[in-house]
Image (spheres, rainbow, N blue to C red):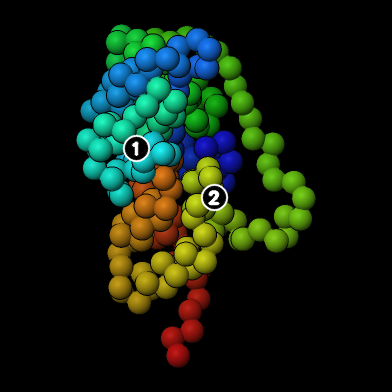
Amino acid sequence: SLHRRGDRESLKEDFVVLGCPSTGINKKGAAPKMREFLRICYKYGPVNLGDVKTGNIYTTPLEDILDRVTDSTVVQCAFDSRDKLVSVLKELREKKPGISVIVSGVTDIVQGIMYEAGLGRIHTIEYSMGTWGRTERLPDLEVLKLTTMCGHAMIADNLVGKLLRDVKRGRRTPEEASVEMAKCCTCGNFNVTRGTQLIREMLPLYMMNRY
């Protein structure tokens, strides 16, 4: 979730919340804590939620995700609203499920959310330093804005092109195309609200040979 591409306007309402136990500290017996974390997050309307070992809510029923949580699970929830995240963090502060919680987003916006939720200063910050090497081989930035919402690179750039063609031809709506991309992101990092908006923005730029 560190490597999402886009400007501040595009990323200001895009947040990923991860819950994970710590090896050697609280990993043993962590499964019930992970389930409580997921239930709290789900209450506030995440646009995606998942477990890398099981799938996300667009491929797997929530109860199956909860049932398959193990002590070594790392779970993730994507939110499309600052207000939702404030509510989630307030309840996590109150309930204290006993696991590590990581929030991914624009740093100063996340810090403001932390203050509003009564959590004070951010404990630790990890930055993305960008992409190094033969960057000319990367897809266009507009495509990367979509594909980098899956941290494990499970959304192919050719799939983005195919889904854009489907939308242009009237075979899918932008919402349906965004959900199709979300299905590829097993963890649940893909923000379908932002995905829908990005697809709408790309449509006028995407040229297609109809013959």
Which quarter of the picture shows residue 14? top left
- As drawn, 209 above or below 118: below
Which residue is drawn at the image coordinates 52% and 66% (left, top)?
158
In this view, the residue in front, 179 or 164, is: 179
Q: 191 or 28: which is nearer to us?
A: 28
Amino acid, disc 2: Ala
Describe residue 1's horizontal placement relative to residue 94 as left or right. Answer: right
Q: Are marks 1 and 2 in contact (CB under 8 Å)?
A: no
- Where does residue 26 sit, x and y in percent of width and height? 45, 12
Q: Could you tell me residue 2's position as x and y percent?
A: 57, 36
Res 9 seen here? no
The residue under label 2 is 153
**Secondary structure beneath disc 1?**
strand
Residue at label 1? 49
Give me the residue at 33% from left, 17% from top: 33
Is 113 in front, or is 97? Answer: 97
Most distant residue in the right direction: 133
Residue 57: give x, y in percent of width and height: 29, 43
Cα gap from disc 1 to disc 2, whole angstroms? 17 Å
Name which residue type carries label 1.
Leu
